[in-house]
């Protein structure tokens, strides 16, 4: 009982520290203007709650009802009825604003509306731990939580009021419920899974990933036709509701905006952008955990059966991004739903490597070690070629030596030491992060 309480206490302490961590400078960085989409959602929700008509800013020429609005030198071409995004995230963000007395567009404050995604990030981080623990064990859950709650690119993107920050906990909650009940699925659970799938669609069009992932897992596991059809019909009911939402306000305009959204400039370059350009909102930021996380997804494919509950949604979402995200706009928030899955798989492969001698920790040293050397040591002390070579020897030689000598204990200790050192590096980088203007 003492050990259980101690483990719970450790998780609670990490979550508490993580909350203080994400709240540090949360209204300052990323700064106002990094993306006007934060105002998109707050305007949308506020107008629906107050006036019953979806209103927000958009550059699409299809809108005929429009007017100009300038707030603190920021220009917004406001349109109505607005259909660029589904309304659920806007309703959540605007509710927080209203609770703080912000009833007009010009009163919207980032320090208020960002509290919504910060709360959602804490839910997401808790689910990361729970999923990691359920699938792989306590240590994996703990390491996944540490990665997710300290990594700079994850924390900074989690601060902004984007729909992906609501989609992510809905996504993870659906996966967690499926993991818990997959061997004893009943009608109430399937109805709940269908509801989460439907709410995801009302959050973001790419929210269809929740339904696609669950449907794939249902079919592969040969769940009963009755339960599978119940999942499909429940999700479709929410999807039909979204269509009715568009038809109620302006069916022709709704269809036109959907069509415009589907004609974005997509192509093979999307793969290169996703693989090689980690982005915080609108600025590139070369975080080694990002590259290691992507490598973890592709590495886990080798053991598909073991990792399929994470691999299926991760690969499906990645493929959907390739065929839907624009090649012309740098948008870091598209990757937000992938971050928790990357954290879980990275932790799982690192912990597994401590039981088996394999190359995976060398990838952590390569991607995370070199990126933190670049971001922490070099700006503060400079980095001469001789120093760089020395650091490489210090990082790699002991681990490779332990592998060669088959010293499992030393190897495991070294992996843990480097992991926790890199987590401390995350803390330093995230705490001191300044978003480029």
Image (cartoon, rainbow, N blue to C red):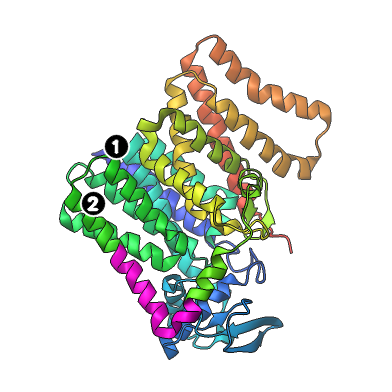
Query: Is residue 249 found inside the magenta-colored segment of the image?
Result: yes
Relative depth, front residue between 319 and 411: 319
Left or right of residue 127: residue 23: right
Residue at mark 1: 3
Residue at mark 2: 228
User: Which secondary structure dominates the residues rendered in magenta?
Assistant: helix
Position in image of residue 132 (x %, y %): 38, 41
> Who comes first in sequence, dot 2 or dot 1?
1
Q: Give residue 86's quadrant in the image.
A: bottom left
Q: Which residue is found at the position 62% from the left and 72% from the top?
A: 36
**Residue 121 seen by the camera:** yes
| Up/down of 110 relative to 378, above or below | below
| Up/down of 142 relative to 200, above or below | above
Relative depth, front residue between 203 and 319: 319
Q: Secondary structure at mark 1?
A: helix
Left or right of residue 263: residue 120: left
The quadrant of the image that shows the C terminus is bottom right
Position in image of residue 401 (x %, y %): 59, 14
């Amino acid at each position: 009982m003492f050990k259980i309480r101690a483990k719970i206490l450790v998780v609670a302490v990490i979550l508490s520290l993580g909350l203080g961590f994400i709240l540090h400078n949360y209204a300052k960085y990323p700064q106002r203007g990094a993306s006007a989409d934060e105002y998109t959602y707050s305007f949308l929700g506020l107008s629906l709650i107050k006036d019953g008509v979806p209103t927000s800013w958009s550059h699409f020429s299809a809108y005929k009802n429009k007017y100009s609005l300038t707030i603190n030198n920021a220009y917004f071409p406001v349109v109505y009825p607005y259909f660029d995004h589904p309304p659920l995230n806007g309703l959540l963000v605007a509710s927080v604003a209203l609770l703080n007395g912000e009833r007009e567009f010009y009163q919207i404050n980032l320090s208020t509306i960002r509290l919504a995604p910060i709360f959602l990030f804490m839910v997401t981080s808790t689910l990361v731990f729970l999923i990691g623990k359920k699938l792989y064990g306590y240590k994996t859950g703990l390491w996944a939580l540490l990665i997710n709650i300290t990594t700079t690119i994850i924390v900074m993107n989690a601060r902004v009021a984007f729909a992906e920050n609501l989609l992510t906990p809905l996504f993870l909650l659906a996966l967690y419920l499926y993991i818990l009940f997959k061997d004893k699925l009943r009608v109430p659970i399937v109805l709940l899974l269908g509801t989460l799938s439907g709410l995801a669609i009302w959050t973001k069009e790419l929210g269809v990933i929740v339904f696609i992932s669950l449907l794939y897992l249902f079919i592969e596991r040969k769940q009963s036709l009755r339960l599978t059809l119940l999942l499909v019909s429940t999700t479709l009911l929410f999807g039909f509701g979204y269509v009715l939402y568009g038809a109620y306000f302006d069916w022709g305009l709704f269809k036109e905006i959907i069509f415009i959204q589907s004609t974005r400039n997509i192509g093979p370059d999307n793969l290169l952008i996703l693989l090689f350009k980690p982005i915080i909102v609108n600025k590139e930021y070369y975080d080694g955990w990002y590259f290691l996380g992507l490598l973890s997804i592709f590495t886990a494919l080798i053991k598909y059966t073991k990792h399929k509950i994470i691999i299926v949604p991760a690969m499906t979402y990645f493929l959907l991004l390739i065929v839907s995200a624009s090649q012309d706009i740098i948008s870091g928030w598209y990757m937000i739903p992938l971050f928790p899955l990357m954290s879980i798989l990275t932790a799982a492969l690192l912990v597994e490597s401590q039981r088996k001698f394999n190359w995976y920790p060398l990838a952590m040293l390569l991607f995370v070690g070199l990126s933190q050397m670049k971001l922490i040591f070099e700006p503060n002390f400079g980095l001469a070629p001789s120093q760089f070579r020395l650091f490489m020897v210090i990082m790699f030689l002991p681990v490779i030596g332990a592998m060669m000598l088959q010293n499992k204990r030393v190897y495991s200790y070294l992996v843990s030491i480097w992991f926790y050192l890199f987590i401390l590096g995350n803390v330093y980088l995230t705490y001191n992060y300044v978003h480029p203007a």
